[in-house]
Image (tube, rainbow, N blue to C red):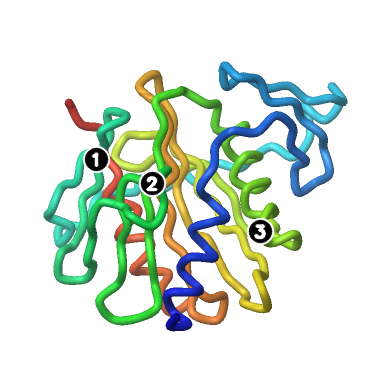
Amino acid sequence: MKLNTFFLLLLISAVSAFAQKNAITEFGEEVVLFEDGSWEYVNKEDATKNEIPENPKQFKRDKESSFLLKSKNLDVGFYVDPKSWTFKKANENEEAEYEFESKDGNLYGMVISEKIEIPLITLKNIALENARSAAPDAKIIKEEYRNVNGLKVLHMQINGTMQGIKFSYYGYYYSDESGTVQYITFTAQNLLDIYKDKCEKLLNGLVKVDR
């Protein structure tokens, strides 16, 4: 198996599941997650701690992102630059809708969606716990709310190590009454700064659409 393929399969395995019952945040708070998508802190005092900042910038779709992919599970789409990315229906992971691969290097992307609405703070905890299931040292390096084409999304960078490979997830998390989506790019940690602008351009193609 090629190293690139092995690396890709490792990263896919760590973001494939939404379902969780309990979670521990990167700050050590314990939360309980319920089947309807709601949640609560085990220690109520934690509810007032560690608020996520909001970026005042308005993030917009790049004009070169001209090809629209639509989700089958919720009312969102993904504008992609076909000159920079190859994309297809996901076949490595049943939980995913689409897979992306940069045409110029070791950068990948994925759309994982469900029809259930999940609060963004709960989705944050789920994403971190999923990453830690494959990389116990996974931690959130950056988090903020963003306005992306009129949608409030949670932006996160999660770093960790799997089988000696240092990786970074760099993605958007969004949920509304039609469902929930994790829109994620991922690569090796030492390559993220090189690819960050390209990640942002892809992620900023997230839009609301009619199905």
Taking the image as shown, residue 4 lies to the left or right of residue 60, namely: right
Q: Is label 3 in a helix, a strand or a loop? A: helix
Q: Residue furthest left?
A: 66
* Amino acid type of the residue tagged 3 in the rendering: Ala
* Amino acid type of the residue tagged 1 in the rendering: Gly
Identity of the residue drawn at 69% across and 62% down: 135
Among the two numbered marks 1 and 3 on one chain, the one whose residue lies closer to the N terminus: 1
Among the two numbered marks 2 and 3 on one chain, the one whose residue lies closer to the N terminus: 2
Question: Residue 181: where, in percent of width, then height?
Answer: 41, 38
Identity of the residue drawn at 75% across and 49% down: 26
| Residue that carries the numbered disc 2 in the rendered image | 96
Taking the image as shown, residue 93 lies to the left or right of residue 91, namely: right
Identity of the residue drawn at 70% across and 57% down: 139
| Residue that carries the numbered disc 3 in the rendered image | 134
Q: Is label 1 in a helix, a strand or a loop? A: strand
In the rendered view, would you say 202 is above or below 23?
A: below
Q: CA distance from mark 1 to mark 3?
A: 29 Å
Sort mark 1 into few (<14), some (14-19) or many (20+) by Cα contacts within 10 Å: some
Question: Residue 160: where, in percent of width, then height?
Answer: 66, 66
Which mark identifies residue 77?
Answer: 1
Among the two numbered marks 1 and 2 on one chain, the one whose residue lies closer to the N terminus: 1
* Amino acid type of the residue tagged 2 in the rendering: Ala
In the rendered view, would you say 155 is above or below 116?
A: below
Question: Residue 97: where, in percent of width, then height?
Answer: 32, 45
User: Which callout, 1 or 3, points to the residue nearer the camera?
Assistant: 3
Sort mark 2 into few (<14), some (14-19) or many (20+) by Cα contacts within 10 Å: many
